[in-house]
Amino acid sequence: RQCLDRRIDNRDLLKSEVDAWERRRTESGAQIRWMFSTDQAREKMAKSYPIPLLNES
């Protein structure tokens, strides 16, 4: 979202922008806050999160 107001027209500038963004994000201690557990994901999106089958010998 931070860069949508302009066009980044070369690869080197894009890389430096992404590196700077990533560094600021890491230094700020940003974390992902998952909205649901794996079990809840399997319940809501069964096709995308199938229950793994155990190999029984």
Image (spheres, rainbow, N blue to C red):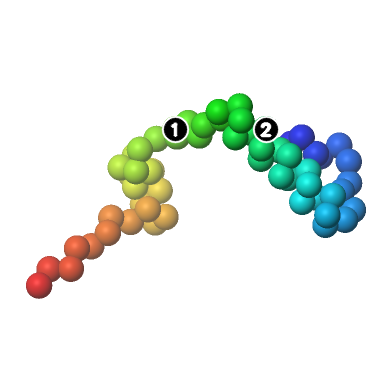
Label 2–label 1 contact, CB within 8 A: no
Q: Earlier in the sequence, mark 2 or mark 1?
A: 2
Which residue is depicted at the point 63% across and 33% down?
Answer: 25
* Circle number at residue 54: none
Residue 54 falls in which quadrant of the image? Answer: bottom left
Q: Is residue 8 above or below residue 55?
A: above
Amino acid type at image mark 2? Arg
Q: At which x and y percent is residue 22?
A: 66, 40
Mark 2 lies on a secondary structure that is: helix
Q: At which x and y percent is residue 12?
A: 83, 54
Instruction: Say which quadrant the C terminus sits in.
Output: bottom left
Instruction: Give the side of residue 32 with respect to residue 50, left or right.
Output: right
Q: At which x and y percent is residue 18?
A: 73, 45
Instruction: Say which quadrant the N terminus sits in.
Output: top right
Q: Foreground: 11 or 32?
A: 11
Mark 1 lies on a secondary structure that is: loop
Q: Is residue 40 above or below residue 33?
A: below
Dot 1 surroundings within 10 Å: few (below 14), some, or many (20 or more)? few
Dot 2 surroundings within 10 Å: few (below 14), some, or many (20 or more)? few
Q: Foreground: 48 or 37?
A: 37
Residue 39 falls in which quadrant of the image? Answer: top left
Instruction: Give the side of residue 47 with respect to residue 55, left or right.
Output: right
Amino acid type at image mark 1? Met
* Circle number at residue 24: 2
Which residue is depicted at the point 90% across and 53% down?
Answer: 9
**Residue pointed to by mark 1:** 35
